[in-house]
Image (tube, rainbow, N blue to C red):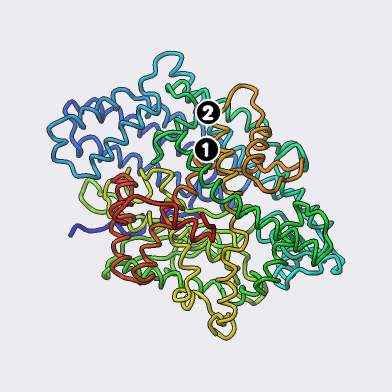
Amino acid sequence: MSQSVWDATSLPNFTDVDVANIEADLEKLLKHNQSAIDACVSENTQPTWESLVLPLDQLHDDLNNFWSPIGHLNSVKNTPELRAAYNACLPKLTQFYTDLGQNKALYQAYKNLAESEAAKELNQAQIEALTQTIRDFELSGVGLEGEAKKRYGEISQRLSELGSQFGENVLDATQAWSKLITDESELSGLPESALAQAKQMAEAKEKDGWLFTLDFPSYMPVMSYADNAALREEMYRAFATRASDQGGDIKFNNAPLIDEILALRHEMAHILGFENYAELSVATKMADNGQQVIDFLEDLAKKSKSSAEQDLAQLTAFAKDENGVETLNAWDMTYYAEKLRQHKYSISQEELRPYFPMNKVLSGLFHVAQTLFGVDIREEKEFDSYNKNLQLFTISKDGEDIARFYLDPYAREAKRGGAWMDSCRTRRRLSDNRLQLPIAYLVCNFTPPIGNKPALLTHDEVTTLFHEFGHGLHHMLTQVDVSSVSGINGVAWDAVELPSQFMENWCYEPEALAHIAGHYETGEPLPQDLLDKMLAAKNFQSGMQMMRQLEFSLFDFRLHMEYQKGISVQSVINDVRSKVAVTTPPEFNRFQTSFSHIFAGGYAAGYYSYKWAEVLSADAFSKFEEDGIFNKDTGARFRDTILANGGSRPAAELFAEFRGREPSTDALLRHSGIAA
């Protein structure tokens, strides 16, 4: 067995990141890499895997290991100095990768290797890596000449700047708004946890009273529980108009950026010979073409709409009969939905919080992973950290370390909202035959610990943690040694959500909840009546939730598919809503200006992937429903087909191997409580 790389150099040193020298250090590294690539190409008249791919993988890895902690810190500990350095580096990185993608000699070297006698000796992962690399050269405009080539480079540069600017505007617009309340009577209905958090935030700013922000752990309790309709409206308006021309500081307005991003993506697709950006996006996905995506989404919408209409009718009737409300405003929906949930099931997320302390949830999550996939997880105490709440864990299997991950769980200032998993290191075989082990970043924005209480999660937050950990497992349990198809690399984007959405299922299984839930003071398990109510409420308003996700997916895909000069983004979303939405947001709502997934986060013409992969994950989980949710053999099979193979084989093939057939939407509709 060859030795693994697991030493001090395998972890990033966050505290050593020298912001003042980032740009100069990057320039030096890029210059070195460019020279090394040129030398590698000129020496490779008869390329082999060892002479061409391994040295280039090493260069790519060196660059990733330099840039990964910088990109990570820019997301989780943003400062003006770091932001300036990060933005100064983006054009240089973009230029480097654009030149790389259009390097004809390098492209030819890869093609020569793929067509050589030596290629017959390559394994499945190596062949797939070559196939994908050659495809990616072609999608990066390697065949372009003259003006088209120059223009492609300019577009790539500008798009990377615009994506970064979009994300910054959302962060800045979110942080620019806050509301201090000094009269407690204005806060009736809010649970103790939300009041304590708002109090703690006010104290941190040396203010008296309760401070609210647009960060989700602060925003959501107000929308769900505050009896004060004026406060709900004020916060809803602020949230729904973030980074737009409808509210807040106009300098954060993302609308002009959206117009420019769409125009440039469309132009880029044309330069590469595609009709529109949606077709370019689908070229690397499981879906065969754009029409298949539209058909898939519209079919799900057709099957789910009546369920959503019933949800809305029920909510409207409840608000009217129980509360005398004639018209449900957008800022009333969550509030009355929470009241209806209480009315029907006598349960709220707040009631569940005491049973989901962070440490118990983590040990339950690790128990699930251990039982299903045969791994052990231990916490490391000594490591370089950028925040007191950051944790580091090592995963081992059969007594041998195989991966590590960082967990950064809580919301705070200067940290991007949402939850995500990112790659820190990729598993790969080095030229000296040692194995580099994978490392992941898992980032969430949960309600932090308050006072001397531990962090208490809502069940929704528990589900988010399982989701991100699923992405992490995909990255960390890979058995592929070729970096470009190892872990999540090279996985079709519309299949990348399969493991993450798959893991969420255990949050609803009594057998798993016995390990995940336990009262933070007494350790007592989730009482049977609360468990029954929680499971009964699982599909509460799932029809409306389904239609909301389909609305976002259709908006994203149609925007990129139907783009033409002068298109009105608002008119596209209005048209989508007229077809699939059961409620229409107010005129001022500008959700698109903070839709970072598609304008700053890699999901452009790909947001449908969540639903596409949810069909796969629900169907995969139904195998566990048949065999037992902790069936070790089925768990090992999921690990060894879906997780271990990474991007080394097509996702459709891996799914069919695990399930024994093609995927079906039946399980998703059944899990969502929607009768097809």
Amino acid type of the residue that numbered disc 1 sits on in the rendered structure: Ala
Residue 187 in percent (x, y) is at: 81, 66
Q: Are marks 2 and 1 in contact (CB under 8 Å)?
A: yes
Q: Magenta region: which residues? A: 497-501
Residue beneath the point at 31% across and 36% down: 132
Position of residue 579 relative to residue 11, above or below, is: above
- Name the foreground residue: 343 vs 557: 343
Tell me the number on the disc at residue 265: 2
Tell me the number on the disc at residue 604: 1
- Name the foreground residue: 116 vs 609: 609
Residue 470 in percent (x, y) is at: 43, 59
Position of residue 447 relative to residue 11, above or below, is: below
- Count of numbered badges drawn on the protein: 2
On the rendered structure, is 548 left or right of 66? right
Please name the predominant secondary structure of the magenta segment in the image.
helix
Residue beneath the point at 73% across and 57% down: 333
- Name the foreground residue: 384 vs 67: 67
Near mark 2 (Cα within 10 A), the count class, few <14, some 14-19 or many ≥20, is many
Residue beneath the point at 25% across and 37% down: 53
* Location of residue 419 by image quarter: bottom right
Amino acid type of the residue that numbered disc 2 sits on in the rendered structure: Arg
* Location of residue 205 by image quarter: bottom right
